Amino acid sequence: MGMTITQKILAAHTGLDSVAAGDLIEASLDVVLGNDVTLPPAVKVFGDVGTGKVFDKTKICLIQDHFTPNKDIKSAELARCMRCFAREQDISHYYELGRPEMGIEHVILPDNGIVFPGDLVIGADSHTCTYGAAGAFSTGVGSTDLACAMARGKTWFKVPEAIKVVLKGKKGKDITGKDIILHLIGMIGVDGALYKSLEFTGDGVKDLTMCDRLTICNMAIECGAKNGLFPVDEITYDYISRTNPERYQADDYTAFEADDDAEYSQTIEIDLSEVPFTVALPHLPSNTRDASSVKDMKIDQVVVGSCTNGRIDDIRKAAEVLKGRHVHPDVRCIIIPGSQKVYRTALDEGLLAIFDDAGCVISTPTCGPCLGGHMGVLAKGERCVSTTNRNFVGRMGDVGSEVILAGVPVACASAVLGRVGTPDELGEV
């Protein structure tokens, strides 16, 4: 029996000729990731392991992004713990606020060329599955597994079954990867891919930008998937050649392809031309609707950003919708570039001026409001349209608040209209 892309990557990192769904394996790791929330608990466990030193200081990435700039004393202590550990271990990829390469972890790792096709990546953050957009196997783990991985450079996996998602056709105007993944989650539910690999294929893949793919893989976890994965194509090669030219030229990576006889537990087909502007209503990412069917829902806040939709393509799209328009007087619109590089590019291109003219708040890169941390926490009874990835009860603030998930065009159109809306409603400027 042939293997899926996921199975081939796992086999390559275990030294086995093949693996099959359900196998328990121990695999070597290319990248190990921790952030300011998950790294501090791992530091204590790392000390208990007793190795003293990390397995490879060049393969560990530590990023301050969840509560930075530090919102209170507790978050400052978490940041200090990470900073001290990074210095003690001489970690090569340590990113702190204000540096040119700094930002939200799942934005900067691919954009800084740290993840490549065929890599095996774990991170103590559930949205580590983002990097499947670049042809890597990447998945989230807990802080204990992070600690052991930092010490040993290996971890265990149960090889997942796979779901084949066949994408056909071309997406409509202003439809994004966010609409596509919300559409899929709405089809199969929040546990529809539980501990399975979502492997995307079909002629529709070539119609998806790298930003679309990163967004789709980022939210694979929201339907329970172990990971999401796209095949490597010219769009992938163009991206990695720009993010890390040296490694691209060195050709020290492998772009795996699924075998024709690979086994899948399920096949799902999606015609991209039929995917509408899609939103997820409270309080699950699977509670999806065509955005045009819920236009009576008034809102108090809009958030554009996060590891899901804070990339430069997202910020450009937001500026395209907001240029010459103004945020509704009853709405707060917060724009959060996903990295310092994205922020500077947006500044150089005049995008931040567009947001300022539109009446938006512009934030330094941070996870911030996505997890109800800061920079946009909701009060009881408030409703937010957000480009983030989760809308659970109390996710962005008070348990009596509501979060509606949407893509950037819908979020920005909603900011202007003061209610859930779509960009085609705005008319000419």
Image (spheres, grey):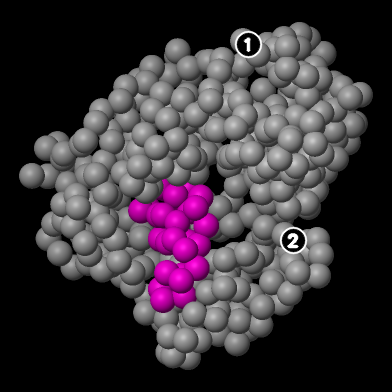
Along the horizontal axis of the image, is 414 left or right of 217?
right
Tell me, yes or no, whether the two marked residues, 1 and 2, touch with CB atoms within 8 Å.
no
Q: Is residue 89 left or right of residue 356?
A: left
Task: Examine the rendering and report whether any part of residue 122 can be seen.
Answer: yes
State the quadrant of the C terminus: top right
Task: Look at mark 1 in the image and give the residue it sits on.
Answer: 292
Residue 380: mark in rendering: none
In which quadrant is the N terminus drawn? Answer: top left
With respect to residue 93, does 327 lie above or below? above
Residue 249 image point, x, y percent: 40, 59
Query: In the rendered structure, which disc, 1 or 2, sits on the residue that comes first in sequence?
Result: 2
User: In the structure shown, which secondary structural element does the residue marked by tag 2 occupy?
Assistant: loop
Q: How many labels does the image show?
A: 2
Q: Give the range drawn in magenta.
A: 121-149
Label 1, secondary structure: give it.
Answer: helix
Q: How far apart are marks 1 and 2 (CA)?
A: 36 Å
Instruction: Tell me residue 212's x, y (percent).
Output: 51, 34
Q: Name the residue under label 2.
A: 68
Determine if the magenta segment contains residue 304.
no
Tell me the amino acid under the disc marked 1: Ser
356 relative position to 427: left or right:
right
Residue at position x 70%, y 32% in the image? 402
Answer with left or right where residue 382 lies relative to residue 78.
right
> Residue 51: which quarter of the image?
bottom left
For the residue marked with disc 2, what is the amino acid? Thr
Residue at the spot 15% in from the left edge and 64% down from the top edge: 16
Q: Counting other residues with Cα less than 10 Å from the Cα at mark 1, is it few (<14), some (14-19), or many (20 or more)? A: some
The answer to whether residue 240 of the structure is visible from this angle is no
- Residue 397, horizontal then vertical, whole percent: 74, 44
Residue 67 falls in image quadrant: bottom right
